[in-house]
């Protein structure tokens, strides 16, 4: 159960900035999606977060496979069922292997390929420690280049932030 009111309908909103945010999210996403049902309580912050999310999802250079693998890995690490439910089907469509997704969800003895292992290991280490080792960083730069590594790191941060906001609100 949510700790704060989830703002799902325009009629619930009390300010012009909230209504503007609502209209923008609904126009771009078709509905007021869960993260913004929480974030709409702080519309200026929500608007800026929306811009970052659009850049990460639609303006970045990461391959869809890599971005979605990052997102579902962060969803599991941060225990955010909403992110998993939203991105698991997208990840599969983007080419993440079903057995890799299952490995993330429940562990086991699935053998990861080099790309999967590198990305999942990077996300796990970053989320666990707030940093990565020099070796892990070099491995990621070898795989994705500097721009891709920075973008992947920002993607981890973005989806971790959304998970934190929704977890604290009881909305994951």
Image (spheres, grey):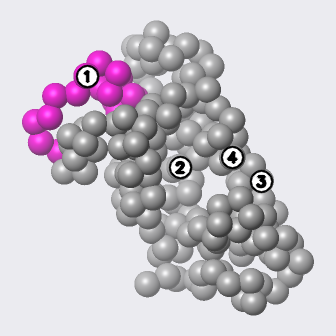
User: Mark 1 or mark 4, which is nearer the start of the sequence?
Assistant: 4
Residue marked by disc 2: 159
- Residue at the spot 39% in from the left edge and 60% down from the top edge: 85
Is the Cβ of the residue at disc 3 closer than 8 Å to that at disc 4?
no
Q: What range is drawn magenta here?
A: 107-130
Please provide percent x and percent y for residue 163.
50, 58
- Residue at the spot 44% in from the left edge and 52% down from the top edge: 87
Question: Is residue 78 among the parts visible in the rendering?
Answer: no
Instruction: Answer with the quarter of the image where residue 114 lies.
Output: top left
- Residue at the spot 19% in from the left edge and 51% down from the top edge: 106
* Nearest to viewer (mark 3 / mark 1): 1
Residue 168 in magenta? no
In the rendering, which numbered label is found on residue 113? 1
Residue marked by disc 3: 48
Crowding near the residue tagged with mark 1, few <14, some 14–19, many ≥20 C-alpha atoms within 10 Å: few
Crowding near the residue tagged with mark 3, few <14, some 14–19, many ≥20 C-alpha atoms within 10 Å: few
Residue 127 in magenta? yes
Is the Cβ of the residue at disc 4 closer than 8 Å to that at disc 1?
no
> SS at mark 3?
helix
Residue marked by disc 4: 54
Whole-angstrom CA distance, mark 2 to mark 3, is 14 Å
């Amino acid at each position: 159960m949510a700790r704060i009111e989830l703002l799902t309908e325009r009629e619930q909103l009390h300010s012009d900035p909230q209504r503007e945010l609502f209209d923008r999210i609904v126009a771009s996403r078709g509905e007021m999606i869960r993260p913004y049902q929480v974030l709409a309580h702080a519309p200026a912050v929500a608007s800026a977060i929306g811009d970052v999310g659009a850049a990460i999802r639609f303006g970045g250079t990461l391959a869809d496979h890599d971005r979605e693998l990052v997102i579902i890995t962060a969803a599991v690490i941060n225990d955010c069922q909403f992110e998993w439910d939203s991105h698991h089907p997208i990840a599969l469509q983007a080419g993440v292997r079903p057995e890799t997704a299952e490995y993330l969800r429940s562990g086991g003895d699935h053998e990861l390929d080099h790309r999967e292992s590198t990305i999942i290991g990077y996300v796990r280490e970053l989320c666990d420690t707030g940093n990565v080792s020099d070796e892990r960083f070099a491995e990621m730069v070898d795989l994705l280049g500097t721009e891709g590594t920075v973008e992947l790191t920002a993607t981890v941060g973005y989806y971790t932030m959304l998970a934190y906001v929704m977890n604290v609100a009881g909305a994951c």
